[in-house]
Image (tube, rainbow, N blue to C red):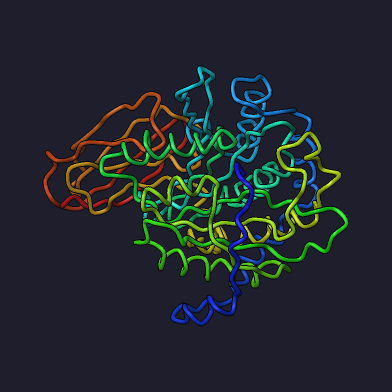
Amino acid sequence: MNFPKRNLLFSVFTLALSISSYSQSFIQGYANVVNQCSQTNITNSLTQFEALGVKRRGTASLQNTLDWLKNKYLSYGYTANQLEEYSYTYAGSTAACKNLVVTKVGTTYPNTFLIVCGHYDSINGTGTNDNGSGVASILETARLLQNIPTQYSIKFINFSGEEDGLKGSQNYVSAVVNSTTPKMDIRLVFNLDEVGGVAGMVNNTITCERDTSSPTSNNAASATFTNQLITCVGLYSPLNTFLASAYSSDYMSFQSNSDIITGFFEKNETSHKHTNTDLLIYMDPVYNYNVAKATIGATMHFAVASTAALTTEENKDFNVSFFPNPATDVLNVSLGSLTETDYTLTIVDILGKTVLNTTINDAQLIQQIPVANLAKGMYLAVLQTGDKQITKKIVIE
């Protein structure tokens, strides 16, 4: 986190009084996934992150950390096509910084995104707590959700340049979010910053952060989502919760862009951030593990995860999807978990006649196929790559 945390704290009871219309219940399927969270993975990620050194802009350590992150996501089963790097510079510096974005496409609302984010750069030290702890929690969440369908799309984002004044998130908002036509539809930004706890203290409470800043148009929505976050913490982790205002981390770039935000921050605040003693020995990795459990449960809730066991047919389909369905001018093809990026798409009408046949090479994660010239009606879309064939019904309106 770039600046000292402002001491604007409120009681959870006050939030409960102000927001009483939303109710959540325990979902065993979510808990089953949360319980696969690994303390070993959290501790190993923290250890490896620390060993990568001081992650300052323009340094080999920052690049090495980016490469480490990419390899982590690939090892979880994400494809290279799902990973995007955004390189940028900013006024006053010629050093390149990079944001890493990993996209998991939703099944029902593929164009609406839950952003789960945290920064991976550091200043004056390795930044093992600030913010290796957030990185470790995000990685474990991404690992466990890789093969679980979610209604909303998820973008796991690792920002750089946070310690230079939120430069990475600012660049992403301006260069990507606001440059998408239409503007990227963001359901919620869920930020994790400094969630590693303090060694030797009782670390049993996580601070949940809501938007209380201007512009105020989304403050009520942020409060509602933060109340849901508080509930998820209670349902899927052993942690207590404490309410505070969002302040001075990457979600504020989205907040000023009128997007809805929430976040996690440690309740016992480290005295080692931004120093060369921001190290694992001064943290509580068990607390970090419990925060990761809360993060997994909340992410499943916010993205509306499916807990049904994948059937043989679903496995055969590799979570490939065609949307919107019905389509009008453009049909989007999501590759799901397919690793191949070259395929042939055939669209067949109800009489068995091929009305479209196209070969796509080096396909994007979401590939657009023009269908405006097709007559209204029902069709079969057949995606063929190697020995894999995925067939689904689509409707053209």
Residue 89 x/y as whole percent: 47, 23
- In the picture provided, is 112 more to the left or to the right than 9? left
Residue 62 x/y as whole percent: 64, 26
Say which residue appears at 74% left-offset and 33% top-offset. 126
Looking at this view, name the residue that lies furthest to the top: 94
State which quadrant residue 245 falls in.
bottom right
- In the picture provided, is 189 more to the left or to the right than 272? left
Say which residue appears at 58% left-offset and 44% top-offset. 118
Residue toward you, 101 or 148: 101
Residue toward you, 181 or 102: 181
Quadrant where the N terminus is found in the figure:
top right
Residue toward you, 148 or 169: 169
353 is higher (above) or lower (below) than 358: below
State which quadrant residue 75 falls in.
top right
Say which residue appears at 61% left-offset and 34% top-offset. 74
Q: How many marks?
A: 0
125 is higher (above) or lower (below) than 105: above
Say which residue appears at 31% left-offset and 27% top-offset. 359
Residue 361 x/y as whole percent: 37, 24
28 is higher (above) or lower (below) than 366: below
Residue 183 x/y as whole percent: 30, 44
- In the picture provided, is 12 more to the left or to the right than 321? right
